[in-house]
Image: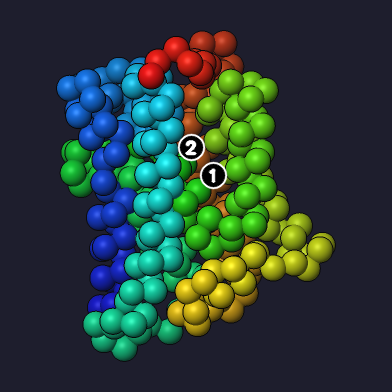
Amino acid sequence: MLTLLAILAVSYLIGSIPTGIMAGKMLKGIDIRKYGSGNAGGTNAFRVLGWKTGLTVTLIDIIKGVVAAVSVVAFFRHHPIDVFPDINEVALRLLAGMSAVVGHVFTVFAGFKGGKGVSTAAGMLIGIAPVSMLMVIGIFLLTIYLSRYVSVASMLAAVAFPLIIAIRKYIFELGSGLDYYIKLFGEQLSFHDSLDYHLMIFGLIVALGILYTHRANIRRLLSGTENRVTFGKHS
């Protein structure tokens, strides 16, 4: 139990790194939560700080999720504080990733007011089901290209993930592409079945959470006042 708590705590702290807030302070001396949508995530960084900074913030937030789901769990597997908890591997990585997402949304370093968790949740799932997430990222980018609404792309991608997992598992009976990770990092990243029911249930929970955190965006979409992303206006 102590090891599990350590994994959750370290993952939470990693997720809590306030990337967008730090970028705003360092580049423009502002708190981006006081501008744009009032959010500290990558989407608002695009609006307030420009697309280059927004992209950087988004990538770092994604990496936070990957690190929590992959590296933190792998580290404690080899450096256990006590007897490692007997938890399904996928479920354990999901718990670590979720802790990072919670840290991103409720960052301890910025008054517990952070981003919406989309990028960090995406990173967590990239670390667990990279092939499925590649498909989701494709949907995300295509939606942004066609609509210019990051919020719409985020919500659609979130809903698509559990559907893709279910289709790949139950219709095509495919794996998640983790053989690459296993070959690269060795047995420490060996998964039981990365497309098991834990991943699908969690995907549904994440989708509902993303829809909930985007409720203001949904209202703006319905009223026609949601901001569109434009590229090239800022540097």
In this view of the protein, which residue sits in the foreground, 73 or 158? 73
Residue 208 circle label = 1
Q: Which residue is mark 2?
A: 212
Amino acid type for the residue under numbered disc 2: Tyr
Height in image: 50 above or below 42? Answer: above
Residue 4, given in percent of the width and then of the height, sits at: 32, 74
Residue 1, numbered circle: none
Q: Nearer the viewer, residue 153 or 141?
A: 141
- Bin the neighbour count of mark 2 within 10 Å (Cα to Cα): few under 14, some 14-19, many 20 and up: some
State whether residue 166 is above or below residue 32.
Answer: below
Instruction: Give the residue at x 26% y 37%.
Output: 113
Callout 2–callout 1 Cβ contact below 8 Å = yes
Is residue 32 in sight in this rendering?
Answer: yes
Tell me: residue 87, above or below residue 126. below
> Which residue corresponds to the image point at 33% horizontal and 45% vertical from the top-left?
104
- Measure the alpha-carbon separation of dots 2 and 1: 6 Å
Quadrant, the C terminus: top left
Between 99 and 235, the one nearer to me in the picture:
235
